[in-house]
Amino acid sequence: MVKNWIEKNAYNIFMAPTILFILLMVMFPLLFTLYLSFTEWSMGTTAPRFIGLENYINLIRDERFINATGRTLFLAFGSVAIQLVLGTALAVFLNRNFKGKNLVKTLFLLPMVVTPVAIGMVWLLIYEPTLGIANHLLKSIGLDPVLWLVDRRIVLYSLMLIEVWEWTPMITLIVLAGLTAVPTDPVESAMVDGANRWQIFWKVTFPMLRPTLVIAALLRLIDALKTFDIIYSTTAGGPLFASETLNILAYTTSFSYFQMGRGSATIVLFLVVIGFASSLMIWVRRKVGIDL
Amino acid sequence: MTGLQNVNAARLLSAKQKQRKRVAMRAIFYFFMVALLLIVSFPIIWMILGSFKTNLQITDPTKFFRFEPYFGNYPEVFRRYDFFKPVLNSVIIALGSTLIGLFLGLPSSFAIARKQMKKMSIIILIVRFFPGIAFLMPWYIIFTKIGIVDTHLALILSHLLINLPFIVWVMIPYFETIPKELDEAARVEGCSTFRLFLSVILPLARPGVITTALLSIIFSWNNFVFSLVLAGGKTATLPLALFSFITYVSIDWGALMAASVVITLPILIISLVTQKYIIQGLTAGAVKG
């Protein structure tokens, strides 16, 4: 009897722990965050006080929040765009047989698997105004030193450079894998027809790569919107909030200022931004004909 | 006669030229390749070099690449900054959350693959897209209430949020490639679904399991934000211990770089040994769809 029941519901039993986990650890916290976003609460002894949409209204009027939103989008779109162009170019460059190709792939793997906080620490040393190698290089070619992480106008670009270094290899590896899946017949017949390399890439290879590129771009975009470790470990959003993104702002509001209600509202709006990007991705995946 | 010789000589010359051109092209290719590799691996090389320098050597541009190696930073990291504890914490939490993640995630992704639960797989994908911060506050509050902040359990549970969706997401397409006919054949032999999963499907899916296990260990090892909120003095993981270095008044660069190498080394080794699996896992979803 029991055995029969187990056999009949085997797949449900397989699913049960995961569903339970999602309900308890994902759904419930999300709803709780949503509830907190309508309250004022500093985690003290008093209960959260319901204040309706006040947190949201205050946020939308707050320049710091608006700026953080702009920075989040700028950093994510900017770095992913550079990664795509650079990563694809490198993949095309590497797409041939040569000695040491596997070693190259392994080295390309490193930036994205090494602990982000450790990466942040090394770049902190590289960017150090007086003893860093970045300024030493500038000096040796006769340029003025740059306050990489201290100058408010430059800090975002410095962080973008780290992001590009960290994630361009991922695009390269994805495109390389995609290129090996591209059939060689069309390329060969284009060559017979006298097309040059540039034409072959744009007219033959690129269209076949497009689905891969679109998905890689969106995956990267969603992850880039969430960048936290690199920013927090190098600048913590500074100087004077100049590198503060939504993720950092939500963290600071909740866990440094202990404004739980306002922090929750920031998180909810942050989720709206990510949700928009995610649904874009799911829509595009369907559109390019790749089934979920 | 001489005319023919000339033509032959010219041919020979052009063949030689062609070959020379090919050699030159290859030289240029390798030149760019080496330059590229130097750029890609430079920060990691810099980290390793810095870990063998004294603070005086780090500040001296003439000693950027040529210097007398100093081995004192590593003992310093473990002695003065007490790195044994965070290493142990990170190992416990990474292995714990990976094992539980596999235990929960593998059967579920098999069920999703076989029953073609589209909605479930979309939910998992969406969970993967959520930033950790979205769950942190409620957990912090709940974990404080039930008194498990600063325990391994709290961190393992939180790391599951990254590992479980990742494992399920990579494994669904993997299980789908295993033909259903195998299920039926096993059932005819009198295999229960549990037996089928454990002794037929899982062994076939081993490469996928290895990939997801390795990556979920790496993700957990690298995770910073959960420790920042949920860990305390007892359970500080390596990224947190590393981060606390820069809150000291003046930065001990040599020790900081040595500590960075300590945290990076296991990942370097895993990646070097299991490169193929890691690339597969990281690029999954983009190439396979």
Image (cartoon, coloured by chain):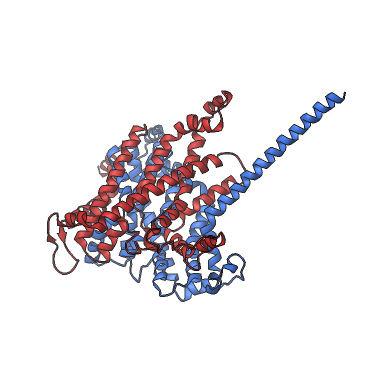
Chain colours: A red, B blue
Q: Is residue A106 rendered to the left or right of residue A31?
A: right
Q: Is residue B97 left or right of residue A196?
A: left
Look at 29% across and 57% down and name the residue there: B133
Q: Quadrant of the C terminus of chain A?
A: top left
- Give the answer, above or below, for where B199 lies relative to A148: above
Residue B187 location, x and y as percent? 37, 35
Residue B83, picture quadrant: bottom left
Residue B178 in sight here:
no
Image quarter where the N terminus of chain A lies is top left
The quarter holding residue B52 reads: bottom right
Give the tally of numbered discs. 0
Is B49 situated above or below B97?
Answer: below
Q: Is residue A227 visible?
A: yes
| Percent of width and height locating residue A104 | 56, 48
The residue lying furthest to the right in this view is B1
From what the image shows, is residue A99 above or below residue B68? above
Which one is in front, B275 or A239?
A239
Residue B11 versus residue B234 in the image, above or below? above
Residue A27 pos. (x, y %) = 23, 51
User: Looking at the image, which is closer to me, A131 or A91?
Assistant: A131
Q: Position of residue A273 (x, y in %)?
A: 28, 48
